[in-house]
Amino acid sequence: MIITGKYPQLRLRRSRQNKWSRRLISENNLSVDDLILPIFIVEGKNKKIPVKSMPGIFRYTLDKLNSIVRNAIDLGIPMIALFPYTQKKLKDSLGTESLNPNNLVCRACKQVKKKFENKIGIMCDVALDPYTSHGHDGIYASGDVLNDETIKILVEQSLLQASAGCDVLAPSDMMDGRIGVIRKALDKNGFKNVQILSYAVKYASSYYGPFRDAVGTKNLLKGNKKTYQMDFRNSNEALREVALDIKEGADMVIVKPGLPYLDIIEKVKNKFKIPVVAYQVSGEYSMITNSINKGILNRDVVLETLMSFKRSGANAIITYFALQVAKDL
Ligand code: PBG
């Protein structure tokens, strides 16, 4: 029963009258425990390079990384996500640099693990796009991205990142069957406690533009990613993706982007009861930041937006606002 009485006996405004009462009956809450902080990293020394399309976001050299991570730990943020900007000279059509045990992201993992041990979780993407000269997430041949050939490299990349200290591997490539193969390889190689956070539902979205600027893939991308990322007209297909990834051993799943896909978050949560992570992507970040000074209060609009993820059933949120929000909370 939703209605238990009627006006004037029943007044829903009664319980909204005071702040203590509103707090008491609040159905959803946001805490720092819900936040995952993405960090862009770049080669070099003593640099903090602004990302043009994402006001307030920077690429950091590794000597600057520890202080950001320290800040995140002090604020109580449970996990960071590391995204490397790869120098152009290191990119090729096979994404060879992804298998260099001393590549930027592996060095970053080692450094953070060594300094902070288990005080904060480290998440890394598993995909080739930071390393390929064509900007695709896998091996590209005659106009398409090759599934099975790509998975072989993703497995190697996963093992490398795991041995560098990555706690949570997040395959973001959308190849079929990769979760099962990666899980098997991790278990076989002594990484049975390394988690897999699958980008199970990743739409071919126009909201990724600023991110591609941040990691330097924007001008390289040949065509689009529609043969592997999902069609935004579909929602049943999202459930099939999640079902498969759970069967293959995913510990948690991502729905991405966030705000235009709240319906999907809710459906996935209701159907599978698995930890769901919403990714508030770069385009969402930019839209909100661009609206500051136009009468919209940044802080409040950010909290309101993040709460929509909680309401729809997300357990955690990857957000470029993580540091700011953690401070506000
Ligand atoms: C790479 C990757 C992308 C994002 C996260 N990992 C971009 C893409 O698939 O092209 C997007 C994140 C964002 O826009 O904030 N596979």
Image (cartoon, rainbow, N blue to C red):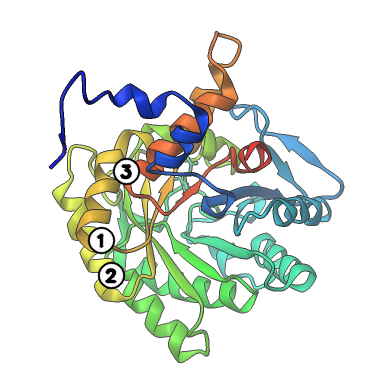
* Total marks placed: 3
x, y (%) of residue 55?
A: 64, 27
Of discs 1 and 3, which sits in the foreground?
3
Question: Real-space Cα distance between discs 1 and 3?
Answer: 17 Å
For the residue labelled by badge 1, is the local secondary structure a helix, a strand or a loop?
Answer: helix
Name of the residue lying farthest toward the right: 46
Relative to 200, does residue 180 appear above or below in the rendering? below
* Left or right, residue 192 beside residue 273: right
Q: Nearer the viewer, residue 80 or 237?
A: 80
For the residue labelled by badge 2, is the local secondary structure a helix, a strand or a loop?
Answer: helix
- Say whether marks 1 and 2 touch (CB < 8 Å): yes
Q: Is disc 3 surrounded by few (<14), some (14 to 19) or many (20+) residues within 10 Å?
A: many
* Left or right, residue 242 beside residue 150: left
Of discs 2 and 3, which sits in the foreground?
3
x, y (%) of residue 235?
A: 18, 45
What residue is pinned by disc 3? Answer: 312
What residue is pinned by disc 1? Answer: 242
Q: Is disc 2 surrounded by few (<14), some (14 to 19) or many (20+) residues within 10 Å?
A: some
What residue is pinned by disc 2? Answer: 246
x, y (%) of residue 145?
A: 33, 55
- Mark 1 or mark 3, earlier in chain: 1
The quadrant of the image that shows the N terminus is top left
